[in-house]
Image (spheres, coloured by chain):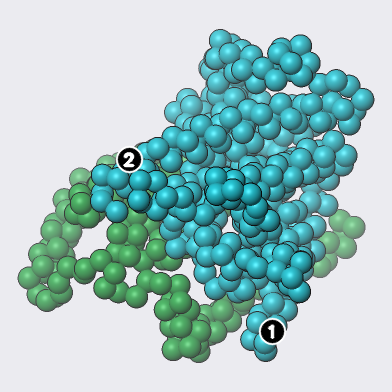
Amino acid sequence: MHLILFLIFAAVCVAGAVNLLAQRHPINSALSLIAVMAALAGEYLLLGAEFVAAVQVIVYAGAIMVLFVFVIMLLNAGVEEQTKGSRVAVLFGVPGVLTGAVLTAWVLLRHSGTEAVALGALPGHPIEIAHLLFHDFLLPFEVTSVLILIAIMGAVVLAGKPEAEERKAG
Amino acid sequence: MPISVFIVASVVKSVIVLLALLTAVAYTVWLERKVVGHIQNRWGPSRVGPFGLLQPLADGLKFIFKEDLIEPHVYKPLFIAAPMIALIFALTSISVIPFGNSITVDGYSIPLQVTDVNIGLLLILGVTSMGVYGVALAGWSSNNKYSLLGGLRASAQMVSYEIALGLSLIGVLIQSGSFSLRSIVDAQGGHFWGFIPRWNVFHGQIIAFFIYLMAAYAETNRIPFDLPEAEGELGAGYHTEYSSMKFAMFFMAEYANMITVGCLATLLFFGGWHGPLFGPAWMQAILPVLWFGAKVFCFLFLYIWVRGTLPRFRYDQLMSFGWKFLLPLAIANLIGTAIVAVTW
């Protein structure tokens, strides 16, 4: 049962990713990315990581992708242009990616020495994650939040008008 | 419980809950027209059946038989998908809402809830955050200025108020220590000093409740936050180009979302199905579900009452209210609850 569900979600995931590249219109690509993220959330659920699955949907599929779609809608981005270069890229890129994927899978299968993970074998409960985040890895967590704060301040500075211009407008 | 019993019970519960929800949606529309009518000194629907009670049926038939226009300038795949997305996500979130305690049928204890997951609340938040796409894509794919503006307003508004909504819920989570809606309700059983129910709203979360209420009104695009479909300036906003059943889907999604918000408010702040129990055994079994329904009804009535009373915000007022008032208030409430929880 789990294997069947895994295969279904994996198929959706890969199909979404291929569709993302194949679609010419940015909004279709963005929607494919949402499908990929939702399917990934399904895979997390199968691993017993409910919290991570929910966060994947809320943060990535729900919040970040809404902003992507929002920007595409605001800019009214048109259909992607095709140049000679992009045809060459398809010619070499597709076989290259396929070879790379097969190689990676082969190496992982032969040499990583990892086993399939049983359901519920990994910590996924909110309490365990909270303990990890706010106890064991408190310092990295706080440092990351400072990093994000700096990024927010940078965005505010970039978005704000220069003072001289504002005075002129006012 | 054997798997066959589980599957039969789940299918029966899903069908019952879906039918109940769709009926509730139809009659919330009726209630709204009736109540707003009386607020405005009119009768509301009164011709079809006694008190106009058959009006939703007539409306449904009308929607089915109306011509389904698809304008030539729309982006067809998304134009068709958008109302489905909106309705699917609106109906999905009801699946984790518990309506009462377990009932015992043929020796098996069956919880009155389609499925009890231990991340129920997060699941609802995730599903509602996906619901934004229905509105945003409808506005964009209509290829019409008014629709696009409506879609943009809706997505900006829903993303902004989602933060305040989420933060207002964390206080409740701190008090109950679980994401499961069933355990959140179970934690609210009993009374203070024997008569005040131990509901979260009387348990220090009254500010959180008001934040939740306002953010939820914004999330469901209801007056006074119905900027996305402000008819005076945008035609009908994101659903200007929709007709027939596609319009009906948006309409049903909006009302289903209202009901979900009412259910969630009842579960998180008003003790869910807890209420005085009395009478014989069969009454004791039914009363929790009735209490739950009555509390949800109060929220729906409040929605309609507000719609009949308040004017609409301006867009800048909406944004500054969400970001500069609700969000700091929610954070303050969260810190306060955390301090109380840690020190006591």
Q: Position of residue B259 (x, y in %)?
A: 63, 42
Residue B208 shown left or right of residue A14 in the figure: right
In this view, which residue lies farthest toward the front?
A: B280
Where, by quadrant of the figure, is residue A83 drawn?
top left
Determine whether the residue tagged by mark 2 lies in a helix, strand or loop: helix
Q: Viewer-proximal residue, B294 or B302? A: B294
Q: Which chain comes out cyan in the rendered image?
A: B
Q: Viewer-proximal residue, B117 or B149? A: B117
Q: Is residue A47 visible?
A: yes
> Dot 1, crowdedness within 10 Å: few (<14), some or many (≥20)?
few
Front label number (1 vs 2): 2
Looking at the rendered structure, the kind of residue marked 1 is Ile
Where, by quadrant of the figure, is residue B327 drawn?
bottom right
Q: Say which mark, if any, is on residue B339.
A: 1
Looking at the rendered structure, the kind of residue marked 2 is Val
Q: Earlier in the sequence, mark 1 or mark 2?
A: 2
* Badge 1 and badge 2 both on one subunit: yes
Q: Chain of mark 1?
A: B
Q: Chain of mark 2?
A: B
